[in-house]
Each structure stands twice: as structure tokens, then as C-alpha cells.
Amino acid sequence: MPLIEVKNLEKTYHDEEVATQVLFGLDIKINKGEFVAIMGPSGSGKSTLLQILGFLDPPTGGEYLFDNKNSTDYSEYEVAKVRNERLGFIFQSFNLLPRTTVLDNVKLPLVYSSTKEELWDGIARKAVDSVGLSHRLDFEPSQLSGGEKQRVAIARALVNNPDVIFADEPTGNLDSKSGEIVMGIIGMLHAKFGHTIVLITHETYTAEYAERIIKLRDGRIESDMKVANRRAGGFIK
């Protein structure tokens, strides 16, 4: 049974009297433990699709089922709980809190979870260690390189042990070496811990870390294929 499934999914934005359709009848299934890359040029609809899959924006047509339950059947409370405890997000712009240590940035999702407060430090430290940044626990974002900031964002996404990690252009603000390190870590997390990963990217090199690539063009699926020669993920300190 798929963890994520969309059926005839559509999205239209309305601006005063103008309607702009962005997604056209998408059918996609993503099983638990899969690593899927969604590719496409700017304007193809990939970020819109991610917004819907992450419960950040509702579809205007078709269905989105998460864990075999239609997104429209989730209450506001249930959506908040799913987003906090079952989904992790990694963004191109890192979205770290300034003047806040690495440890406290990573702990943030735990504040809104049901996890007991006395456990927060240990869980956050373990997540930071998993991305090789234990030596930066007390640093603030301004003291980190771009690659290190993204690794902190990965640790924050992991801290609640989510079912799905959504990575939206995670290497977009990084140089090629830092980008390789970040993708190596994401690949390692999938290989070692079996996280379901949905990667949004326009880079073929980055997409090749996935098991499967879905290509969008003009809001429609152009292709959906397994990756023949995957790039290996690895732990790099």
C-alpha cells in the first residue's frame, strides 16, 4: 500500500478574475521507504506538488491520500500533528533561527511534539551527530558554512523520526562540494534508516541519488522511471 498517493491531482490558483492551472491530472504512488526525485524546469509544477504533499497547500481537484487517508478527511489538529511528527522538511534557504545554537535549532520540532522535555537534548544531539556536526553544537548559523547550515536543517528534519523527508532543492544554495556532502548524507539516511524521501530538484546529478525520477513539464508527468545507475550516499564528516 502506498504511503503517498495522488489521483488525478489538479491545482489552480486564482488571482482576482484570472485562473492559472499549475497541475493537470497527476497520478503518482510513493511507497514507504522509497527515495523519489521530482524533476522539472522552473514553472513545471514540482514545488506546487511538494506543497500539496507536505500539507502546506490543498489541491483544487483530484485526491491526495497520505497513509491511505484522504487529505480532506484530516482535521486541522491532525494536519498539524502529521506535519510535526510524520513529515520532515529541508528547504533551499535552510530556514534556521538566527542567534540560536545548532542544538536549539534542531530541538525546535520537539517543542511542538509529545516527546517529554527531558529527552529533547539527547534526541537532538543524536540527530546532530548523524550529520557529522557534533563539534558545532554551540555554534550559531552565522558561524557556519552553507553546507553546515544545510546539515543542521537535515538534523532538524530528522529529530522527530518522520515517515517522510521532503527536500526542496537542498543543494540550490551550495557549491558543488558542499552539495555532494549534503546529498551523500541524505542518501545515507535512506540507505541506513529507510526514510521515505521526496526530493525536488532541477539537477540531474542530484536526482541520481534517488531510486526513481519523476519528471514534470508544464504541470504534467513527462516520465516516471527507475534510476539505472544510482549515486551512492555516504557519511562524510
Image (cartoon, helix red, strand yellow):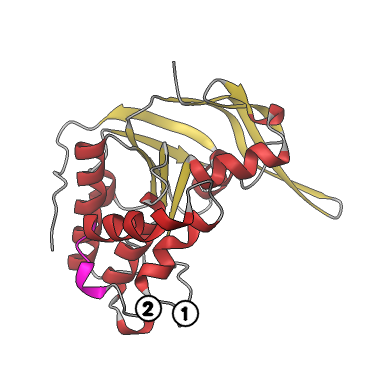
Tell me, yes or no, whether the two marked residues, 2 and 1, touch with CB atoms within 8 Å.
yes
Given residues 122 and 73, the one toward you in this image is 122
* Residue at 24%, 62% in the rendered image: 179
Which segment did they paint magenta? Answer: 131-136
Task: Give the camera-side residue of 65 and 96.
Answer: 96
Callout 2, which amino acid? Pro
Q: Amino acid at mark 1?
A: Pro
Which residue lies under the disc numbered 1? Answer: 98
| Residue 199 in the image, given as x and y percentages of width and height | 37, 45
Residue 201 appearing in the image: no
Q: Is residue 52 left or right of residue 191?
A: right
First in residue order: circle 2 vs circle 1: 1
Q: Nearer the viewer, residue 162 or 45?
A: 162
Residue 102 on the magenta segment: no
**Looking at the rendered structure, which numbered label has been put on residue 141?**
2
Q: Residue visible at 45% across and 83% down?
A: 99
Q: Quadrant of residue 91?
A: bottom left
**Residue 84, image x, y percentages:** 53, 47
Q: Disc 1 on helix, strand or loop?
A: loop
- Badge 2 element: helix
